[in-house]
Image (cartoon, coloured by chain):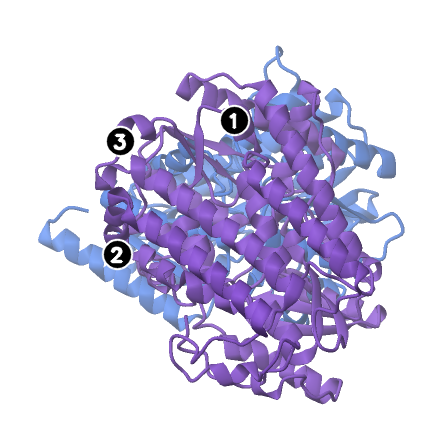
Amino acid sequence: MSRRIGSQPLGNFYNGGKTRTHREWRGFKDTWYDYTRWLFLWKTMIKFMLHPQNLKGFFRYRWMVNYLATLDFLDRHTEGLRGPQLRIAHMEFDLIVEHMCDTMSSLFAADANIGGDPQKSKKIVVFDENMMTQIMNGFPNLHCVCMEIPPIYTASTMCQDAVTHYIDVAEEYGVPSDVCPMPAAELGVAIDDDYPIVGCCAVQCNTTCDGSMMGNGIEARRFDIPMFQLAVPIRYTDPDTKDYAAQEIKNAIKFIEDTTGETFDWNRYFECMKVFNKETEYFREWLEISRTDYPQVVGNNVALYRDAYYQVCGGRDSHFMKNEKAICDIMMKAYQEKNQIVGEVRHRAILWGVQAQYYSAFPLWLQNCWGIVPLIDMLSLTSTDLYSEDDKEQAFYDMADLYAKMNMRNRSEGGYEVGVEDLWRFCEEFRADMVIMYEHVGCKSMTGYHGLFEEEARKHNMHLIWVTHGLMDPRKASRSDMRTEVNRYMHTVLQEKPLDPSLENFDDGNAW
Amino acid sequence: MKDLKHLYYFENLLQDVNNDLVRQAQEEGQTVIGITCYQIPEIILNLPGCFSVRMRAPRTGSMEMGTYYMTSLTCEYCRAMLERSLEGGYQFLDAMISPASCSQLADCMENIEVLKLCKKEKFFIQHVDTPMKSDENGVNHMIKMSRLKVLNKLKEVYGIDTSDDALKKAVALHNEVCRIITEIGEYRKEENPRITGYEFAVLCLITYCCPKDLILDKLRETAEELKTREPDKDYKKKYRARVLVAGSECDDPELIKLIEEAGALVVADRYCFGSFPGRQELILNEEVDILTQICQQTVIQCQCPRYMNTDRIQERKDYIDQLAKEYHADGLIYQQMKFCNFWGYERAASTHIMRDDYGWPVLSVDRPYVVGNSGQMRTRVQAFVESIEIKKIQGGDR
């Protein structure tokens, strides 16, 4: 046990229970840092729970219980990390926790189910989870809430069986069990009447997939507020679709204006886009360093965080920009010091397909167990363009472009070029020798390319490891099943031994 | 009932996508365009010099190669088409139009494209983005896509005349087919219909799968024949209930036959490849551009669940209710191709809504692509018919 990476057999922490047996010793400095962040998170959560309205929310909604595993979530996502990576992880995830607490506080403060303030509710525009929020950059007096995020999206990463109840509710309603569990679970919450009742109007979107869009249609029957459906082109890479997409954005803005009486504030919009652009510049730097021999911001430190600031915040929260600046500084210093993020870098991998929500710490396992560095994942490879900061007409096209290029949607829709071909381009850019190919059994978009992926991988002489999972339903393929697929490939095809043998097989079937 | 004179002929034509009439038209110099979905107006693919064929995979057995490429978790219609492509079954096509209808169909088309499964020199697959809402913006998008991606491409590659005159001729041909199908379909409203759902399904499907001008004479003859056809006297014994069939893609009349053999006469067809919508005349006016009118009809009449605006979602239910009443149905059968995302949700919701809000008995089933001999399906339909009968005997509500 020391500050050296890989000095502890991490698999020994698991004994089949909900939590790990003990905390990790990372050397004095890192352990102390980790401990202070642990205390900080407790403070944040206790402060949240001390608010009477939040306490009511906690006891009203069954999905809230998943957030008791927040600290375990942090432990899972920092497992084996040291030095700069540990700090980057905490800077990101701690901010997300704070942001989630703020979001849920706003939600509960206005929630009619628990006697919330109707005036606050009138200032909320409900957004679909699966959509960008840049439209709201022009409405500073309104608050945007992505309704499905607290009950489903985030909850499913906290606790592996967090949403299975809601999946079952949707299936009992009659939704086939083969569909993606995410929209199914979201629908299950609606059927169970487990969404907070808030908002003066709502905007839904045809992202990320056909199933998600269809779930929205049924959910809309449960939301008794004016609703606008924003249709984003499917073949969005086709330039001839741009006018249609921009007009949809205009119509959505007009809908919000008409429903709320607010006027789109262009100054505020461009201010937010400046922040958003700056964040994109930082992200480009992250990617640039990941292309070198000394990548620093990789795996989980990109995947979940990118989702938060790119999609949910959309430039409205400058805390994220400041955070990214600080991360960039740490990253550059570590890069100059030639800091290696694992004890031995054996493979450089691109993670493609949709990640398992119930095992979002899987990339960390890859690096700890096998020395596979998860350089970047498909969901994070969204737009890195800079958008107009002063041209109003262009801004409609910019917003349309962003809505089309939402996390995941920009690969699952749009065709073969962005879904398959781009992968090999990224492999070349990042000098990857391996692709970890998530196969989400309920995803009807990416699975249609299964054979093409295999054939193309052979042509490109690339190791392609299929990792089957059920996105939010661990009953379809457990965490252990996911690991087994990698283990088999590493043993039989590459004939390698794990860096940390204790991580090859361990029992986390009952863990959070 | 006496057999329809041309039914056997039509049934034989449906045994193969590249049937006798398709080959004949191609030998006469016509361009054949494969199409998978209603989302692109059929009229603009049936201009002088070209015709559309709805892509099917009749007599499908194994789908192993299609399953390798698309996995066992995707729609069997898509996998069957890919399998047929891998076998070389669509080599006769000069082009395929692939609307962005659902991601699985789009993936199937991309597999065909990337694997280069159609070898004709000028062959192309055109991917077309199509609207998901039926508002003004959606119609404008459809017009733009139809013009740029379909008409211009056909003109550029095959020299097809895409002028307004050509479009008018295509509308006239479409209307002629629709008039006959509508006339025949109206008989299903009769108390004792002189045509079965299966026979109608064959006639309707033929109009999607053959060059229209080559089937007109036999369709007309069939319509004439039906005017004097005597319905079965033991109709009530054979069919104990009348049903409307709604749902996803159904290009196999054997499904309708199976339902009817189980005791439910299919009096209305609200599924993809059926007549509602798809076989309605387009009455042109002089004020509006022809292409606009064609696209308006497609967008406004389309009943596909991918149309996502709330009013359209409600309208789909109203439409089924109206059709079921008009055709005196006793119940509804919602059928869905397994792994279809759109109909998976639509079927689930409609089962509740049509039962609770509209009072219809509903049978809700998913099914494989090849369903003609499904014992499970037969049992489900039989049980449904019995439940309708029991309700009738007990005099309860629908």
Q: Where is residue A212 in the image (x, y as percent from the top left)?
A: 49, 49
Farthest residue to the front: give it: A28
Q: Which of marks 3 and 1 is nearer the N terminus?
A: 3
Q: Is residue A97 left or right of residue A462?
A: left
Image position of B388 with respect to B280: above or below: below
Tag 1 near tag 2, CB within 8 Å:
no
Mark 1–mark 2 distance (CA, rounded to whole Å): 50 Å
Foreground residue, B117 or A251?
A251
* Marks 3 and 2 share the same chain: no
**Dot 2 corresponds to which residue?**
B240
Q: Mark 3 lies on which chain?
A: A
Q: Residue A105 placed where, x, y %?
A: 35, 42
Name the residue furthest right. B121
**Amino acid on which disc 1 is placed:** Ala
Question: Quarter of the image containing the C terminus of chain A?
Answer: bottom left
Vertical relation: A466 (above or below) B172 = below
Colour of chain A, in one word, is purple
User: Residue type at mark 3?
Assistant: Asp
Query: Of helix, strand and loop, which one carries label 1?
Result: helix
**Inter-mark Cα distance, 3 to 1:** 26 Å
In the rendered view, does A139 fall on the left or right side of B51? left
- Residue that appears at 86% across and 34% down: B156
Q: Colour of chain B?
A: blue
Please name the residue that numbered disc 3 is placed on: A117
Which label sits on residue A252? 1
- Secondary structure state at the residue bearing disc 2: loop
